[in-house]
Image: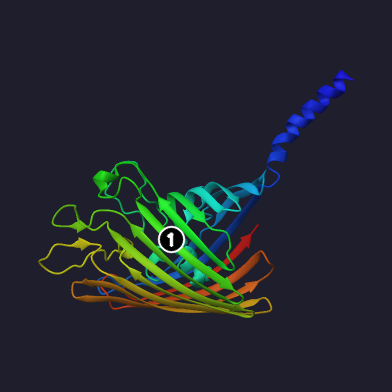
Amino acid sequence: MKNHLVAFAVAASLAAPFAAQADTILYGSARVSLDYSDESNSLFNGDGSWDVFNNSSRLGVLGSEELGGGLSAIYQYEFGVDLTEGGNLESNRPKFVGLKGGFGQISVGTQETPYYHIASVTDIFNTDRSFGSTAFLGGSFNGFSLNTGADRDLGDGALVRLENSIYYTTPDMGGLSIEAMLVANGGSNSTQGRSNDIDLWNIAAKYSGGPFSAGVSYIRLNGDDRVALSNGISVDLDLDQWVASVGFTADPFSIGLIYEQGTLNEFGLLGTARFSPGTPARFGDSDAKNIYLAGEYRFANNTIRAAYGRMDTGLNVLGSDETMDNYLIGYQYDFSKRTRLWVEYIGRSSDSVLYGDQNAVSIGTRVDF
């Protein structure tokens, strides 16, 4: 009898960790393409090149645990996986832990922003080249920092995801929900010209009812309005930006439209200064605007996509008007619910000093598991 009890205890102890992980899901997405890209501007005429390109492949686990009384613990660990050149298990992909219940959801970690949740209504293409800094004002704030230490500042990835964040989402209220994010990254913020308290905050309201959706988001970086660097260059760290979106989905069609305006994206546009001969350069001193329309049509295993956007950076670089037009078309064939093949074209037309014409073709495959 004692031996049976010992065997039962050993078996129970071995099974316990697996029982605790019963609600954990392992998932991933492999996204690789063969791309041809040719870019040029008024200062540089580059030659086109071919590249085997990784498109944000990832590997992750997510799950939840019922705690009783309608309360659940939630968690996610997602890592970037580069299938082409290494750099695996890096990037600022979502990693967080939190609680979910009748009050809504609150989580802490590295998380997608409310801003992106509004703007992503037009992020429909497969290639990573489609929705970056020259098309999406929220797509390029790369954690610009005056800090020279090890602190990673606001994150590498952009306004798509931010580190050191606290995120709250209300329960669904008849199709309406509110999301709020605070970023608090201590370090040496006072020497960086940013706040010692809340570095960045972001709020959004979303509504979804039937085939229609709409949303608006406002994001603000708290800091000094002028921080001197060197050689007459200064940076503005008191920046803000907003986005509004509308969407319509009714099979086999879907369409999304966003409008953005603000100053926060300038750090990712490289045109982060209003350059004029003989005057100091000031970073974060203009007001960018962007409008972007995207849609798709699905039939059988096929999807056709198209998008057009016009971005006015509000910058004047050496007398050049930094305005650009973006246009994209794409075709996708679904072998199954998890495996697809795509062919997409990305074009940009601009006479600016910083950004000229772009022509790129991406031929890729994606497998989800």
Q: Position of residue 208 (x, y in %)?
A: 57, 71
Q: How is the image coloured?
A: rainbow
Taking the view exactly as shown, the residue that stands out farthest to the top is: 2
- In which quadrant is the N terminus drawn? top right
Taking the view exactly as shown, the residue that stands out farthest to the right is: 1
Left-right relation of 253 to 120: right
Q: Position of residue 352 (x, y in %)?
A: 27, 75
Identify the element where label 1 is drawn. strand
Q: Quadrant of residue 48?
A: bottom left
Count of numbered badges drawn on the protein: 1
- Under mark 1, the amino acid is Ile
Front residue of 340/121: it is: 121
Front residue of 164/182: it is: 182
Front residue of 79/5: it is: 5
Is residue 49 shown above or below 83?
A: below
Residue at coordinates 45% horizontally, 67% vertically from top-left?
A: 129
Residue at coordinates 22% horizontally, 57% vertically from top-left?
A: 225
Is residue 237 shown above or below 8?
A: below
Left-right relation of 111 to 354: right
Q: Quadrant of residue 363?
A: bottom right
Left-right relation of 63 to 232: right
Residue 85 in view: no
Residue named by callout 1: 203
Q: Position of residue 94 (x, y in %)?
A: 51, 52
Taking the view exactly as shown, the residue that stands out farthest to the left is: 278
Left-right relation of 145 to 75: left
Residue at coordinates 79% horizontally, 26% vertically from top-left?
A: 9
Residue 200 in view: yes
Q: Position of residue 356 (x, y in %)?
A: 32, 74
